[in-house]
Amino acid sequence: MAHQIWKPGTMIYPLPALLVSCGADKGEFNLFTASWTGTVCTDPPMCYVSVRPERYSHGIIEKNRAFVLNLTTEKMARATDWCGVRSGADFDKWKESGLTPIMAPAVKAPYIKESPLCIECNVADILKLGSHDMFLANVVDVLADESYIDSESGRFMLEKAGLLAYSHGHYYLLGREIGRFGWSVMKRKKGKR
């Protein structure tokens, strides 16, 4: 089969389905769904989220220069979708979604108690790119839900959280593991094929 030629577009899928939380105090706390987000750098640790300037949370993040990236799970799927189609200008998304805001220890924004992993970010730069502004941020803390930490090994078992992914308008659960980093070049133990 041949490949069809499509117009230019952002078709890098799947992406994480995240809830981004923002607001320096309860009076302005908000959250929204985002998939245009990701890792920028390891050292120093940096992430980004791209937001349309007309979105309600854009001004909150721009003013406070902080946000939290909250990973989402199957249990949070309905709230994740709902927060992506409703505006914080019209609804108290925390109340409507049933999610719990907790003030983050290191940034001027809340994190979501129900999220298995929350990444606290301080905005380093705002890049005006066209339809979206990219909030380039330094990661200042990562909050990991202790219920996913193995008590014996100390390993964080995020794979047990039932993480959501987003692909071309649809939400999916992440699937089964097929290998780990470097598995393709690992030497096999004697007697194993």
Image (spheres, rainbow, N blue to C red):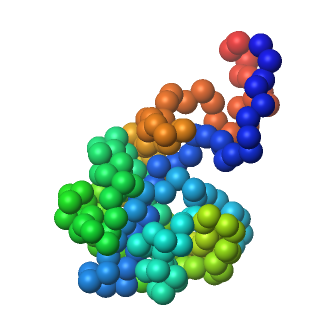
> Could you tell me which quadrant the N terminus lies in?
top right
Q: Is 138 or 77 nearer to us in this picture? A: 77
> What residue is shown at x 69% (from left), y 63% (from top)?
40
Where does residue 163 sit, x and y in percent of width and height?
43, 43
**176 in relation to 17, above or below:** above
The residue sitting at 60% across, 27% down in the picture is 178
Image position of 136 (left or right of 96)? right
Residue visible at 24% across and 57% down in the picture? 97
Percent across and percent down for residue 187 are 77, 27
Q: Is residue 2 above or below residue 111?
A: above
191 on left or right of 78: right
In-front residue for pair 72/2? 2
Q: Residue 181 at what x, y percent from top left?
A: 68, 39
Name above or below for residue 115 compared with residue 24. Answer: above
Residue 33 position in % (x across, y down): 42, 57
Task: Pick the residue in front: 81 or 9.
Answer: 9
Could you tell me which quadrant the C terminus lies in? Answer: top right
Taking the image as drawn, is residue 73 in sight?
yes
Q: Total of numbered circles in the picture?
A: 0
